[in-house]
Image (spheres, rainbow, N blue to C red):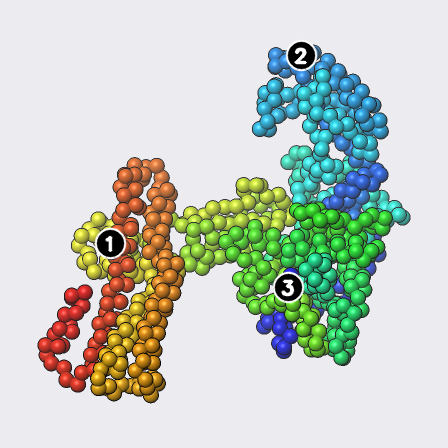
Amino acid sequence: MAEPVESASAPSTEPSGLSVTSGPNLPSEELIANGDQSEAQLDEQGGLWFFFVDAFEDDRSSPPRVYLFGKVQSVNGRFCSCCLVVEKLERCVHLLLKVDQSDIEQNSEAVKMAAAAADREFDAMCQKQCPNARKLRSKLKWRNYAFEKALPQGLGHLPFLKVVCDASGGLPGILSGENFSHAFGIQTSLLERLVLTKQIMGPGWLRLKPGTFRQESARLSYCAKEFRITPASFHPPKTEEDKKDLAKSMPSISPPLRLMSVSLQTVQQNPQAPHEVLAVACTLHPNVSPDASGASQSGHGKWAAIRRLDSNPLPRDADKVLAHAGIQSCNNELHLLSLFLSKVQEFDPDVVAGHNAYACDLDILAARFHQLKVHQWHKLGRLRRMKDRVPRTEGRQGQGFWVGSNLLAGRLVCDVLLQAKDLLPKMGCYDLPNLVKEQLHLSLDTVEPESVAGLYDSARSLKAFAELKVRSAHCIAQLVDYHTFDISAVRDVKYVGAKGTIRFERGEMFKILEIKLIENESFEATLEFGIRLVMPWNAVLGNYLSVCRVVVADDDTFPTNRNHDLLRRDRAAEIHPMVLWKEYLRMTLKDKNVRKAATYNLLTDQVRNFSYLWQVMLTKYLIDQVLADEIQPFFTDPMMPKGREERVWVTLGLSFVPHAVMLLLNRMKAERRIQGMVVNQLQGNLLRKYLNYNETSREYVSTSDLAMAITRDVPELVEHGFMGIFQLVENLGLVLVLGVLMLAQSTEISALTFILFLLIPIAM
């Protein structure tokens, strides 16, 4: 597994402008969490404001619990981590009653009788299939059914029997009965029901009602504050007046989050052996504001540790060199993982960032915790689970999310690889060095697994290796709110790409984003780019409302705006053809991909001219030096063999060189597909222009004319107007080559020879 790392001989491991040391305004005590023992700050009514960040459901405990993790403010004004243990949870099932459509429309007494019969049938099923189930209450409810699956009763307002049971008992695995046709909510998790009923819409502020939370001596988490609550502790607002009253006392800003970025280096003893952790590096950011962009990360610390490779000792003076650089050295992997868990527990991050964390890093950590019997593995999260086993996939694929959410319960996991695939869909490679190059404009080298052993040759190379892991961790943190992305318009060509954070103040209902367009004279028809909203805080993004498509209607004429007035007045016949051809070439060559391919093709054509000169010179040499009775002097005489037979073989071999070179160059020329590139460009512009017309404008355009323009006229224009220039330049180059050859071989040039030489291009 290749990891980003710098070469061992590099004298510096940090790019310009990138610091991996604690900021000047960052006290060392900020890197140690859970030191605040003061009481939580309550509001005037005795309620507690809790900033929700993450949640975890423990359905295997007895009774089952839901843990909410976040931040609360202490009386001294500082924010600290907090865990809310939600108890007395309930499960809810909706039974769709079997009643006739006429009874539903009339809301007759038959509906109430069917509800009572379904209630008795449900009790009988619980006693038979799940004796420990305890029903709390039931009631007839009318609900709107609007799912895709058809029901015998149809869609719309239908009667349901709502049954609420205690979560500590189970529920029968029922789907239907004699008095009800469907059972909804059997598989609904406790966390899902809590989030839906209490309207917890992502990270944001929640208020606990006065007197509904308490502290217990038996702690279930490692958070600085822990309270036991019930679902009734939350009272979501139901009316607009309730929302306004709640907003008046709500804190105006979000608390800073603690971010830890992690970079692992692993090694395999052999291809069949599991990955082992060799080095761990972290950067610690205690003041990351969720309301601002990543640039607001003021000050940070770092931590790194590296262990021995196998049982071999570290290089000479390695302990001293590493200690001077602030890097801890370990004797074995168990010691390394123990130090890493201690650092996580000490810093207590709210967010853990990594590259390919779900599919790689967390899976490897879980496997090594299990293999080495690390009993303190649960310190990677925020729950005290001393008796639980390490969550592992047991060799199954696609379980990375489950392992990550269980291993780091209480901490958000930010996988920059998954984030980049979602936000940067056009990137071809999502490895960390490429992300750092494209997004941060920095360089990050890689080290192959087979070269890891060479880094242990000296203390200097080992230090460089460890510091590069710190640099990788810092780059991960930098990669970690609106942002633009390309559709058909290209960033920094048609518009100025932007990203940032939108913050709504109290009472604000909308915001205006300004994206600067770049004015140019290229005919590009109608182009598009998009704006995507990500990482909502105290808000919810709709599935289809978080992305906006922006259409840029190009007002340039074809091919350029040089003859804009005449083209707009439909007087194109007055423009000289050579002027139009010149502007068409300018428009086509403005595309950097076309310009690059055209340059390579022109050079390839000139190589063909030199191959012709090569063949002429070989023919002359063959006649004058090999076949002639009297050998004429030639400039290659000192380099060629003396014998006639040897010269024949050398001449024969050299005659094949230009054929091999031209075969390779022609293959590369065909793979560039410059003609198809230009045709696709014009066809796409015409089609996008037509598709973005309104209905009135489309009435003036004949679809048959559009089809003929795309399928016939565009290929002809490219064939005769653009591709012909390559043949012209090649012929002119050949004329120059022949002219140079003629001047080199002739001492006197007559007027007739000069006239014939000028007529060669016309003959071509």
Question: In the picture provided, is 761 more to the left or to the right than 465?
Answer: left
Helix, strand or loop at label 2? It is loop
Which tag, 2 or 1, sits closer to the chain's start? 2
Helix, strand or loop at label 3? It is strand
Q: Which mark is residue 108?
A: 2
> Nearest the camera: 147 or 328?
328
Q: Residue at x 21, y 60 (%)?
A: 578
Question: In the picture provided, is 436 more to the left or to the right than 667?
Answer: right
Q: Residue at x 26, y 67 (%)?
A: 730
Question: In the picture provided, is 532 more to the left or to the right than 89?
Answer: left
Amino acid under label 3?
Glu
Amino acid under label 2?
Ser
| Residues at circles 1 and 3 in contact by the CB criterion of under 8 Å | no
Residue that numbered label 1 is attached to? 565
Which tag, 3 or 2, sits closer to the chain's start? 3
Residue that numbered label 3 is attached to? 3
Which tag, 1 or 3, sits closer to the chain's start? 3
The image quarter in which residue 163 lies? top right
In the displayed structure, 427 sits above or below 655; it is above
Q: Residue at x 26, y 51 (%)?
A: 716
The alpha-carbon separation of the residues under discs 2 and 1 comes to 76 Å
The alpha-carbon separation of the residues under discs 1 and 3 comes to 59 Å
Amino acid under label 1?
Asp
Q: Nearer the viewer, mark 3 or mark 2?
A: 3
